[in-house]
Image: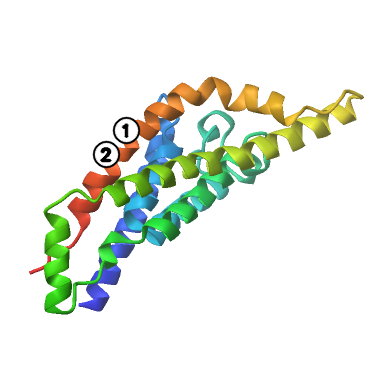
């Protein structure tokens, strides 16, 4: 049974990585939202799927953000927007750590625990809903922060070589993040109920 669970988990990991690859060809960038969603549902297995997806991009497949435009390989990871890709991986690790893997949820052991679990199932867990919202907000911040830092480093290096002044973090935020905030809010709003639905869907049924 344990080996079967591991095999199923591995299939989910590979399947999620392939889904992230396919999302590269979406007209809008949804890979960050998808990676966060996967990690919130499958925990560290979801983060593993994001890592596998990045490996696919490193070996040359045009699946990373901006990869369909600039091609695959490590150049995308070290390029101007490479920090956002690493931010996606860090965000998936954060979600995996804080949310846990629903597939490995332990069955309540004693009669008291079973009764407590049944009581919780009959009402809304507001603490979970608030915690989930805060985790998702933190995850999107984690995606943006390394991206902005890396963007400033790359642009400032180019500017110094040309004899120009380095770019500020405020300017980088304006260029990279501020204009995308409405879209980030939409992705957050869509991800929030999807995490709840998918966690209930993939949670093993306990007798």
**Is residue 116 shown above or below 19?**
below
Residue 54 vs residue 90, the one in the foreground: 90
**Is residue 42 shown above or below 171?**
below
Q: Which residue is drawn at 32% across and 52% down?
A: 41
Kindly identify which numbered label has been placed on residue 190. 1
Q: In this view, does 139 lie to the left or right of 155?
A: left
Q: Residue at x 55, y 28 (%)?
A: 69
| Residue located beneath label 2 in the image | 193
Looking at the rendered structure, the secondary structure element under dot 1 is helix
Q: Residue 54, percent across and down? A: 51, 49
Q: Which residue is drawn at 43% across and 38% down?
A: 31
In the rendered structure, are the residues bearing label 2 and label 1 in contact, judged by CB atoms less than 8 Å apart?
Answer: yes
Kindly identify which numbered label has been placed on residue 175. none
Residue 35 in view = no
Q: Which residue is drawn at 61% across and 26% down?
A: 176
Q: In this view, does 162 lie to the left or right of 68?
A: right
Q: Split into 4 quadrants, where in the image is the C terminus?
A: bottom left
Badge 2: few (under 14), some or many (20 or more) residues near its Cα, within 10 Å? few
Q: Residue 173, percent across and down? A: 64, 27
Task: Name the image quarter holding residue 158.
Answer: top right
Task: Name the image quarter holding residue 148.
Answer: top right
Q: Residue 156, percent across and down? A: 80, 31
Residue 126 vs residue 30, the one in the foreground: 126
Report the number of discs.
Answer: 2
Looking at the rendered structure, the secondary structure element under dot 2 is helix
Residue 61 in view = yes
Distance CA(mark 2)–CA(mark 1): 6 Å
């Amino acid at each position: 049974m344990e080996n079967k669970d591991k095999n199923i988990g591995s299939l989910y990991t590979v399947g999620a990585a392939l889904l992230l690859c396919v999302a590269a060809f979406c007209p809008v960038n949804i890979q960050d939202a998808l990676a966060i969603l996967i990690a919130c549902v499958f925990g560290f297995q979801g983060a593993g799927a994001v890592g596998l997806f990045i490996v696919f991009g490193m070996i040359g497949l045009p699946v990373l953000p901006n990869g369909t435009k600039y091609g695959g390989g490590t150049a995308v990871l070290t390029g101007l927007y490479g920090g956002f890709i690493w931010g996606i991986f860090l965000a998936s690790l954060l979600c995996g750590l804080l949310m846990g893997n629903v597939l490995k949820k332990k069955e309540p052991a004693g009669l008291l625990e079973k009764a407590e679990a049944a009581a919780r199932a009959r009402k809304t867990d507001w603490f979970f809903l608030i915690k989930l919202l805060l985790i998702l907000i933190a995850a999107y911040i984690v995606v943006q922060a390394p991206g902005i830092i890396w963007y400033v480093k790359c642009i400032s290096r180019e500017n110094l070589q040309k004899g120009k002044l380095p770019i500020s973090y405020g300017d980088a935020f304006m260029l990279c993040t501020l204009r995308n905030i409405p879209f980030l809010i939409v992705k957050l709003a869509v991800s929030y109920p999807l995490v709840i639905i998918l966690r209930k869907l993939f949670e093993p049924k306990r007798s």
